[in-house]
Image (tube, helix red, strand yellow):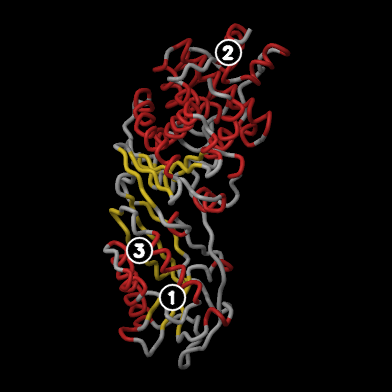
Amino acid sequence: MIRRASLRAWLGATVAAMALGGLVLVAVPGQDAFPATPGPGQPMGAPAPADEADSRAEAVTDLLDRRAKAVRERDEQAFLATVDPEADRVFVLNQRRLFQNLAKVPLTTWSYELHPNDALDVDDLPAEVTAGADELWAPAVDLRYALRGGDVTPTSRAMGYLFARHSEAEGGGWYLRSDNALDRLGRRTWRGPWDFAPCQVTTTRHGIVVSHPGNDQIVERLASELDPAVRAVGDIWPTSWSERVVLMLPDSPGEMKAMVGPDFPVDSVVAVAVADRVDHASRTATGQRVVLSPNGVRALSLPSLRVVLRHEITHLAARTDTVDGSPTWLLEGFADYVGYRDSDVTLAEGAPDLAQRVRSSGPPGALPEDRAFRGSGAELDQAYQQSWSLARFVADRFGEDRLVKLYRTLAAVGPASARETDDMLRDVLGMDRAKLVGDWQDYLRDALK
C-alpha cells in the first residue's frame, strides 16, 4: 500500500512541472562581466567593419568547432586550447573539470551554433573580465547535443559565452574568456549535470539514467524500474512516441534548479517532467527529461517510485499531444491514473483527504480549477486527489479508451471556453460539465462511503 501523504509532496512538483511543464523550457545560471583596452582607433565594444566582422565570425566559428570536436573525441588538450590562457583561473579550472566530468557521457551530437548578428554590447563589463584582451565579443551561441540511448533528436541550449582576442596569438587569437561574465547583461549559460560533478550513465532498453558517483543503490532501482514504466505507459497511451526516457538524478537542489528552472520549488517535489522545445505541428519534443529530487526520490518505497515514474513518463509520452493551457485536472488526473493503474491502491487509500471530505461534508461541487494546482498543502493535495478520482470515474464508467480520447480531445485544444468544453465533453462522454460533476459526485459517495 502506498502512503499517499509521502507521494503528495512529489506530486505537487509533478503538476507544477506540467504547469511550468509541457512548456517548461529550463533556464539556468551564470555570472560576472567587463571594459577594456580599445584596439587602434576602435572601441572594444564598437561594431566592426563588415570584412572584419566576417573574419571574426569565421575565427570564432572555427574555435567552437575545435572545442566541439575535442569533446566528441575526448581530447582534453585540444579542448583547453580553446580556453583563454589569460582568463580567470577559476574559470580555467572549471573548464578542465567540465571536460573531465563529460568523460563517461555517451554523446551522439555535440556542436555549437554561432549567431554573429545577435551580439551584446560589452563596453560596461568590469576591468577584471576585460584585462589583457585586444578585443571582446559576445555573440549568441547555442550548444546542440544529444545523449546516446536517450535523445532521438538533438536539443539545443543557450550558452552565455564571452570571447577574447589576443593579437599576438597564432591563427587570429580568439579564445573563450568566460561563460558567466554576461549574466549581468541577461545572457546566461545553461548548466548541464557535467557542470556540477563527474557524470555516469546507466543504460537500459528504453533509456538512460544520468547520475553522479556515489548513488549506486538508487541508480540501480531507477534503472530496473525504467523499462517497466515505459511499457506500462505504452499499454494505455496509443499515440506513437520515442519510448526513450532520460532520468536525471542531480546531487543537490542547486543542480536540480539548473535543470528545471531557478524559481521551481525543488525542495518540495520528488520529480519533474520537462522539455526544452515542443512542436505540436510536427509532433516533436526535444530535451525531454524526468528530473528527480536528490533527496525526495530516496525516501520513496518501491511501489511509490513506480507510481512516480509512470506519472512522469506519461507526461513525456503525451507531451506533443498536449497544448499549453489545457485543463490541469485532466493532465494530472490522467497521469496519476496511469501511475496507479497497475497498483492495488484503492481510491480511499490513494485519496485520503478527498475521502475524509466526502464523508464529512460531501463531494466537491465543481471540477478542480487550475489555480488550485499552483497552491500548496491541503489545497494542492485535494486538487490532485480530485483529479485522479475524476480520471478513475471516467475509466470505470466509460472505459480506458474513452478516458484516453477525452485527454486527447481536450488537451489538443488548450484554453477553451465553458461552452467549448461542454461541447467536447458531449462529443466524448455524452454529457456536459454539470452532468459530469453530478455523476462524479455520485461515484465518490459510493466509492468512499
How far is the residue under mark 3 from the one under mark 1? 14 Å
Q: Nearer the viewer, residue 110 or 90?
A: 90
Q: Earlier in the sequence, mark 3 or mark 1?
A: 3
How far is the residue under mark 1 from the one under mark 2? 61 Å
Q: For mark 3, does the 10 Å Cα neighbourhood hold few (<14), some (14 to 19), or many (20 or more) residues?
A: many
Q: Secondary structure at mark 3?
A: strand
* Residue with the most extreme right position: 361
Q: Secondary structure at mark 1?
A: strand
Q: Earlier in the sequence, mark 1 or mark 2?
A: 1
Query: Does residue 162 lie above or below 299 as drawn?
Result: below
Q: How many labels, in total?
A: 3
**Residue found 46% across the figure and 15% down from its top:** 395
Q: Are marks 1 and 2 in contact (CB under 8 Å)?
A: no
Which amino acid type is shown beneath numbered disc 2?
Trp
Task: State which mark lies toward you, 1 or 2.
Answer: 1
Q: Which mark is residue 163?
A: 1
**Residue found 37% across the figure and 67% down from its top:** 114
